[in-house]
Image: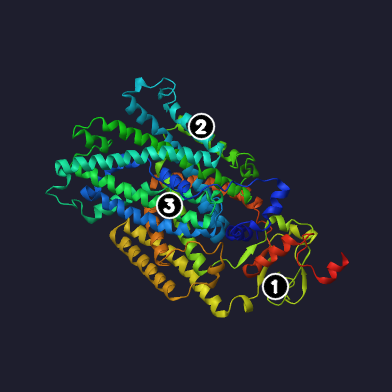
Amino acid sequence: MDAMKWLKSLVRRKQVDSVHGNNHHHHHHHHHQLARVLSVPHLTAIGIGTTIGAGVYILIGTVARECSGPALSLSFLFAGIAAGLSAFCYAELASRCPSAGSAYHYSYVCVGEGVAWLIGWSLMLEYTIGGAAIARGVSPNLVLLFGNSNSLPSFLARQYFPAFGVIVDPCAAILVIIATALLCLGIKESTFAQAIVTTGNVCALIFVVIAGAYLGFKTGWTGYELSRGYFPFGINGVLAGSATVFFSFIGFDAVASTAEEVKNPKRDLPLGIALSLFICCGLYMLVSVVVIGLVPYYELDSDTPISSAFDSHGMHWAAYIITIGASTALCASLLGSFLPQPRVLMAMARDGLLPSFFSDVNARTHVPVKSTITTGAFASVLAFFMDVSQLAGMVSVGTLLAFTVVAISVLIIRYVPPDEVPLPSSLQESKGVDFLHHSGDVEVDDEENSSKDVIQPLLEQGNSSIGRPLILKQSAESSHTPYDEKRRNIAGWTIVATCVGALLLAFGASDVGLSSVPLFTLCAVGAALLISSLVILSCINQDDGRHSFGHTGGFICPFVPFLPVASILINVYLLVNLGAATWVRVLVWLTIGVLVYTFYGRTHSSLRDAVYVPAAHADEIFRRLCTSPDSHILQPKNSRRDH
């Protein structure tokens, strides 16, 4: 029985947002809302700042030398298109479900509590380790800027402690503390600071493009006049390069995490995501076209490719501008990395999966200050003591898992949108909620009494201790015709088959140490599952419930089911190829997460004693609950008379 309850808790889903009854909740608990102050320029600054890290300043050399050669810009283009698939899925969900928590929130609404917890838990790891790694990357750039490590002030320079075998980095810790302080001041202030450093970074990249183009036209683009041609490593090399540079496009998910701070989320979130991704892809391609043209790809320096390209043409001073650009890129990425984490913590705490300490929003600055300080403190200690570069792969797991679940969520919304929603806990707790009178199309899903046309107790004083939630459903006759029910079942199992097919195909296409026969079998089975799933999803109708799911009238993802399925396949392929060492570390972290969920999250979840109402009737029920002076829920006439 306990195992069944545990499994049931994994699939319980929450509402799109808690607008209904939130006021009631906040009134009693003095919770403050996040400030709605952001517009498209702010979101674009957050997106670009978080996405363009210092990676582009280094990656260009490595990928050009080892994978793509002169076709590096095509690697960036393909990676940009692949990231764009995920961005389309994010854009639809961000405009339908504009709440803090981004992928965690979407998966809780569409998939269930278990998957949502794992996404939230892995995002915690991603943002914290990612932020610490970015902070540790700044001091080498400062050393380059000042000439040598001795010219840095002693309190900023890295120190080696042989007794412990660690290199401490005070500069990294100080930067994390500054970023945390900025984020605590308020979303507008931190976004303004991020916009300033992002502008410095973008100006450095534009300088590279303009000065590089001038040199290229002056010298005749020597990098492209090679006997080996444009594709020295073939199209496979270009695709391998795309898989490497794909991680340079991660960052637009930070835009989605600010959903509750955007003035017009339905319009501005999709625009912010699209603009930031488009600008980043354009800049990456322009920089790679120019730098590859200045020197042959095999002569590019692996560590400082852009500076070395300008050096070869006598422009030694350009190295300073490029180093400043890389430093500002790291600072903007640092702010972008710590921006979503407190909001994910806040969203999880609101849902009861983490202690309520994390959900407090400061009355003056309108940001989750306690969550921000906790994140900053943990990351500054990590950045000070640990060389987190070997943990870099773990950062990718959180993002790719989130991207995969977001694409699956789009398929769920279109084909099997949730047809029941839970009553907000604030309304369930209302003492006056005694009875629900419902007509023939609504029933209480209870073993003892399932007759339709009677008044039944919904939440009585003693009912709150009942182990399994009472679920209010529309009866099958009126909510779904037998055809609808059949179609939903087929669609649901087809979405599962899509995910299995993508996983098998990704394993088959990867070098995972299997012999050729099992690999070929995996590929064949995976491809067959994927193709048949796509055919089925293309042939059956999408659910009419999608038109009323969440906040309607916003961005709609095109080419469903093909676009989300392509996104799932790409992200699963990249996940499989992260390597065994990365997965061992991640599984340790996820195991800790499962234990925390089992012993805390599951028992404290706000959906623990949830009462579900049919989605079709939800608005009416919420409206009556919120407007009724005694918070009585649709009480029977004679009961109301007694009062």
Q: Is residue 194 rendered to the left or right of residue 13? A: left
Q: Which residue is mark 3?
A: 400
> Which residue does the numbered mark 2 point to in the structure image?
177
Helix or strand or loop: what does disc 1 sit on?
strand
Task: Kindly identify the amino acid type of the residue bearing the numbered disc 2.
Answer: Ile
Q: Is residue 340 above or below residue 163?
A: below
Is 299 displayed left or right of 628 in the figure? left
Between tags 2 and 1, which lies in front?
A: 2
* Image location (x, y in percent) of residue 448: 74, 71
Q: Secondary structure at mark 3?
A: helix
> What is the x, y in percent for residue 167?
41, 27
Of callouts 3 and 2, which one flags the residue occurring earlier in the amino acid sequence? 2
The answer to which of marks 1 and 3 sits earlier in the sequence is 3
One can see residue 115 in this view? no
Q: CA distance from mark 3 to mark 2?
A: 28 Å
Q: Position of residue 356 (x, y in %)?
A: 65, 44
